[in-house]
Every structure is written in C-alpha cells, then in structure tokens.
Amino acid sequence: MNLPSSLAAMEERIRDSAKRHGLNCFDTIFEMVTEEQLDEVAAYGGFPTRYPHWRHGMEYERLRKHSRWGLSRIYELVINNDPCYAYLLSSNSVTTNKLVMAHVFGHCDFFKNNAWFRHTDRKMMDRMANHAVKVRRIIDRQGVEAVEAFLDKALSLENLIDFRQLGEATPPLRSITPPAEDQEAEAEPNYRLRSRDYMDEFINPPEWMEEKKRRHAAEVEAEKRLPGGPRRDIMALLLERAPLQRWEWDLLHIVHDEALYFAPQRITKIMNEGWASYWHRRLMVDDILTDDEVVDYADTVAGTLVEGRSLNPYKLGLELLLDIEERWNKGQHGLEWENCDDYARKTTWDTHEGRGLDEIFRVRRIHNDVTFLDTYLTEDFCERQKMFVWRRDQRTGKREKVTNEFRPVKETLLQSLVNGGAPVIEAVDLNHGNRGELLLEHRHHGQDLRPDFADATLLNIAALWRRPVVLLSMQEEKPVRWIAADGAVRMEEVIRA
Amino acid sequence: MIGPIEKDQRRFRQIVHGTIRRDLKRYVSSGDLIGGGERGAVSIPVPQIDLPHFTFGSGEGVGRGAGEGDEPSEGEAGENEGQHILEVEVGLDELAKILGEELELPDIRPRGEASITAEHQRWSGIRRVGPESLRHFKRTYREALKRQISSGLYDPANPVIIPVRDDRRYRSSQVRRRPESRAVIIHMMDVSGSMGTEQKEIVRIEAFWIDTWLRHQYKSIETVYIVHDAVAREVSQHDFYHLRESGGTKISSAYQLCLEVIKSRFGSGEWNIYPFHFSDGDNWSSKDTSTCVDILRSEVLPRSNLFCYGQVRSAYGSGQFKRDLDQSLPGEERLVTSAIADREGILGSIRDFLGKGR
C-alpha cells in the first residue's frame, strides 16, 4: 500500500535530514499496514513469504493476543535488505509514524555500515521466498509430517553456529561443499636447523627435537579427528559430514542459512536499537518535530524507553551512546583521565575535544554488543543507571537482587551476551572412540546447561548424525558426559583417573 | 481465503490440543491461571512450544533502575526465550472475556428470561408539551432559530432569538422493559482435617475464576459461602478462604444448609442458582452419601441451573464421593463432577463446569 501523501512528503524530509546528519542508508521502502498484517509479517520474522511451519503460527497467535488485549504492540519492523523494507502501522498517529520513520533510517544505516552485517545477503527477501518455494516442494514429495518433524530437529540446532565468523573477512560458508578427496599424508617437516657438527647439540637439542615431533604428531592426529580444529558451526559440520538424504540436506541448509542471516541482529541488539533511538531523537528534535506534536512524541518515546521486565536494549544502548558522545566531546577518555583520582576534577573534566559524534560513528562501524559494552561500559555509568545483578532464587523462584558492584554487573552482562547468549559448544571429534561417534564439548564458563533441553537437543543431533553423540560438560561443578544413542539419552559423571 | 499464516496457526493449535504431533506435547507450557494477586496482577496462560535447544539452566542477569530491595519483576528473557506467562493488570470484566475466549466457554443462557423483566426509565425522548423544568433548551433554541430564519425575522446584525410557545421542546422519559436475570453462587467447601493448604489454594483459585466468569455473565450476582466438616455453617468470604477446621466430614450437612439457604432467600424462582462444592472426596459414611444423593436429586438439582462438584486430590482423600455421585445420578444434566489433580488441573475443571453454558 502506498503512503498517504502527507507521510510521503514527510518521508522525503526525514530522509534528507538523515542524510544531512551523516547517515548512509540503503533505499528504504515504507509500507502502510494494519495491525493484523503487521502481526503476520512479524510472525514471519519480517518477511512476507516464509516456509510454512507451526512456529510462525505460534508467534502470530501470541502477537495477536498481545495486540488484542493491549498488552504490547509493535511500533516498527524493518528488514535488513537492499532496499530496506519497513512497515508503518496505519493505526498509529502521524507523529508516531514520523518517529518510526526516523528510527528506521537509524536501523537502515546500521545494517549497511556495521561490520558484523557485512556478509548478510542483502537480497534476503528473495532468498526467503525461494526457501519457501523449496520447502513447499519438499512437502509435496515427502509429506508435511516428515518435513515438519525434520524442521523441528533442525530448528532446535539454530543457535549452533559460529558467531565469530560473522566479523571475519571471508564470508561464513553459505554454500557448503562435500569435503575434498583425502590427501596423502604430508611428509614430516624438517625441524633441524643448519649448524656445524660441534654446535648441533646446542642448536638442535635432542629433547627439543623430540618435543617438536610430538607436537606435530598431535596436530596431525587432531587434524584427522576434525579437520580445521574444533568447530562451533555444528550445523555446517552436519551439512558436510552427516549422512543426510538430499531433501534433509536442503532443509538443514535452509535453516542454517537463515540462522546466519539473523545472527548479526542477535549480537548487535543493544547497539542497533540504541543507534536507532539516538537518531530518531536527533532527527525529530533537530528537524522534524512541530510544536504541537511534542507531547505525542514524548509520550511515544517514553513508552519505548520504559524499563519494564528485563533490561531494555533501547534504553541501555541509547544511554551508553549518549554517554560516549559526551565523554568524547569533553575528552573524558584515555590514560590520563582513567588514572585521575580526583573526583571533582574528573566530573568537571572538559578538554573541548568535540569528537563525540566521530566516536559514536566509529562505534557503529566496528563493534558488536559484547565489544561495545566491554569497551565503553564504565563504573560511573553503571552507578548512574543503577544497574544490578539478579539471580533466581532456587526455592522461591523469584528474582533477587544480588549485587550492584561494577565488576560482577559487567561480567554478568557480558556473559549473557557472549556467543549470542547461547552456551559455547564445539565439535571436537568426528570419530570419537574410533566408533564414528560425534564428540561435542561445552566450554563451561560458570553456568550449567539446562539438562532436559540438552537431552532433547542431543537426541536431535544424534538423529541427524545417525551415530551416537557425546557431550562433555559440567553440572553442579562436576564433569559430566551426556550420551545420546539409539533414541535414548543418559548423563553420567565423568570419573577421571 | 485462508492465508499461509492461518494455516500455520491452525497447525500450532492442533499441536497444542494434542491432535497431531504428540511428541511435541511435552514442550507445551500453558502457564498458571492465577488471579487476584497482591498487586491485582493476573497471569494469563498463552500456550507456547519451546523447541529444545542448548541453553543455560539457572537464571541470572542484569537489571536496571529498581530501587533498593525491590524485587525485579518477572519477564521475558530476550527475544529467543519464549515468554510463557503474561502478567498484566486488567479489569475483571476483561479478564472474564479472556477466560471465556481461552477456554472456549459458551455464554450462559439464563433461565426464566422472559418472565423476569425490569423497567428502566431513560430520558431519551422529546415532546412538545411538558413541565418547564424539563425544557430542552438547545432543541427549543434550534426550533426558534429555524422558525425565525424561515420567516425572515432573523437579523444577523442583531441575532436575538425569541422562542414562542410552539418552539418549546421538552424531555420525556421512555420506559424500556428489559429482561433481567439474577444469579447466586453458593460455594461449599470441605474444611475437614484432610484438606491441606494446597487443596484450599486450589479451591480458592478455582472459585475466583468461577466468580469472575459468572459475574461477567450476570448483572447482579450474590455469593454465599458455606464451610463444613461434620457440621456446616455459613461464613464470610474471608473466612471461607482462611478457615482451617479439622474433624470429620459430613457432606450432607452442607447440602442441607445449602437447601435451606436456597429455600429461604432465593426461592422465588427468579434466581439462577449455582451451587459449587469442593472436597477431597472423603465422606463420613456411605449412609451420609446416600442422604446427599437424596437431597441433590429431589431438592437441590431441580432448583439449580448447575450443580458442580469439584474433587481436589489430596494425600488423605479416597476420592470415593465423586464415584458415588456419578453412579447414583447418571445422566443428570445439571450435575457436573470434576476431579482436580493439581494446579494444572484447574483450567480443565473450569472448562468442565462452565463449558455447558447453563
């Protein structure tokens, strides 16, 4: 649906304003939709055409209930695509829709310029539609039950991708090819340095040579077990190595591909929302807002920034960006500032550096949530924002405040964001025990896995791998091993000799 | 036309109801249905299916801005964690609607609809005659204005409007006859020694929801609370929920009292009567049970819209009473019995009770 002319004119103005402020966006196409249509699109993750799956239906039902009962509503929905698609709610007031447009341009700029998005497919709209066609075709052949059951398994592995790949120069594997032919064993390299006879014992000491040989043997061994070393992208590993049928491979491939597409949004949520909130504020206040709209505007903004149930990414991101801007405007950074112990001097510190805007543009280019918070979250900020750590009480099931000290707050926050908030699980051996079993290892950083879900997920992996799957982890500070084999799973303590 | 999203939604609902894909049924969480907490917050169950994935077990996180000692509120833990329980503050009427929608409860068809009517006066009419105290100033002015303009007496430079007798308009009342239905809920609870705290809590929650639903259906509603062990007595709402008695159980005593209450206060035939009885299913003797059945069959059931017996499972109860009722009064339309195993069972039991639309 086309925009009404008043909004179309406004869109033009906001676009210009964004450009003048230095935002660099894809072309953005706004669509006016009803609440019901928006819920539908949102249930499909923002895309008008997705493959059929009950999960979308569940999401739709939840969103509909929320809108019908007035519990919450979606203000904006924007898709990382070139051109960018964004949806405006027809029932929103004109002021709110202006605000949404300004907000959308913020997101759009972020999608285009943030380093972690560089490998996402900017024609995802088409790709998703192609996926939908493919899945429907497979359903026609294999039947809806079989396809759905397999998709459920594949979707339960959705977070087993390697988030680190997103920032690397080479794009993550999207089209995965079967492994190359076996290579002949490499000849052992010669470690011996050139030396004269009488010096040889010193330049190439025998123990050292032994050590080198041992290390090389270990490397060769590890390479045999899993070429390329431990892998976090377990879905890709299954695509390469698991004995899947063609249609199963296609489905898993689709799930993997879409997971990779959504991954950058998952690891930049705070920054992305903060950035968009920062810019809708700037654009609205600088250029767009008219006097009679101020109250409506403030009301809407207050709604988005309210600290509700969990940490609000809009609020945290915005506050932190504002903090950075102020600090770099006043030169409150660097060694000298950090080492300053004089509180009075520190609070009034102002070198008129004026580089605030540059700094936040730099932030939006190179950081993700983890590095962003790690670099810029200061003790002062934590205190001002009254941040604290909560923990769920085992007995009462209620959340309880644990501490508001800086270090634990920051650590807990970072911990919850690392690896997209998911546990780090690596595949380490494809031929565990020389029985073709898949060995996974959970890199335990203080938090246990949820056991019943781990059981079920392992069974799903084992169903694809078609051989037993073993997971090493810790439960209650004891090393444990999960073994999924023959459709059953058991957990046992590992007793180390 | 059914769009793709409706197809997905239908499939999801089928999974939740367990008609297809039973393997997923165990991941369905419905959430508690609990109302009237301290803050008036209500949890609404929204069924969700969480596909298993590797995730952390214990809850821990960072919050912001709550004052000292405040308990941070429950809530969603990020976009990928399905949010199961919505805790919101809504009005009771709204709540009943949601409940009805969730449990697919039919609207109740009150009896005696035609016979009981109430007269309402509404000041919605206009007449040409009437007392000056009811003169409708605006309408009168408008009539006068119309007349003056059409007869050319109106002078825009000097816009004086003078109504004459014919211009005057008066408000008039109109009587509307509306069927009105009144209802009474009689809650009876077994408070003998075998009913523990948990059993009472279950009764409390269930009674709250039943009240909410019936209040939504009827304009005026009265509630009577009866507790019984070996003897029955009428108590206040507060006592009903908080009393802890002990001793034996004689259910007939409660039914007897219930009957007396109906006869003395709600006997005129214009009442929709809903007795609810909750117990753990132990009765004093089988002789007393047959007394109960007699009272129900000949006296209480004919007077009631619906008699509901909810049996809460307890560690001490034998659960015999429900079996006895079912056997002695087979095919009795106005009697609904339901077993409530635990809190999870509350929803199902409410659906049993109120699903008939009586």
Image: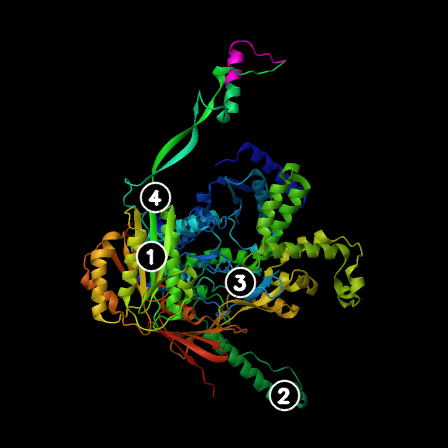
Q: Nearer the viewer, residue A86 or A234?
A: A86
Disc assigned to residue A205: 2
Residue with the mark numbered 3: A420
Residue with the mark numbered 4: B2
Mark 1 surroundings within 10 Å by alpha-carbon count, few (fewer than 14), some (14 through 19), many (20 or more): many
Q: Secondary structure at mark 3?
A: helix
Closest to the camera, between mark 1 and mark 3, is: 1
Chain-order first, disc 4 or disc 1: 4
Q: Nearer the viewer, residue B112 or A5?
A: B112
- The answer for how far apart the CA atoms under marks 3 and 4 are is 36 Å
Q: Position of residue B69 (x, y in %)?
A: 60, 66
Snapshot quadrant of residue A100: top right
Q: Residue furthest front?
A: B264
Residue with the mark numbered 1: B186
Q: Which residues are magenta?
A: B143-157
- The chain carrying label 2 is A
A15 above or below B304?
A: above
B51 above or below A82?
A: below
- The chain carrying label 4 is B
- The chain carrying label 1 is B
Q: Taking the image as drawn, is residue B253 in sight?
A: yes
Quadrant containing the N terminus of chain B is top left
Mark 2 surroundings within 10 Å by alpha-carbon count, few (fewer than 14), some (14 through 19), many (20 or more): few
- The answer for how far apart the CA atoms under marks 1 and 3 are is 55 Å
Q: Nearer the viewer, residue A460 or B186?
A: B186
Task: Report if residue A461 lies within the magenta region.
Answer: no
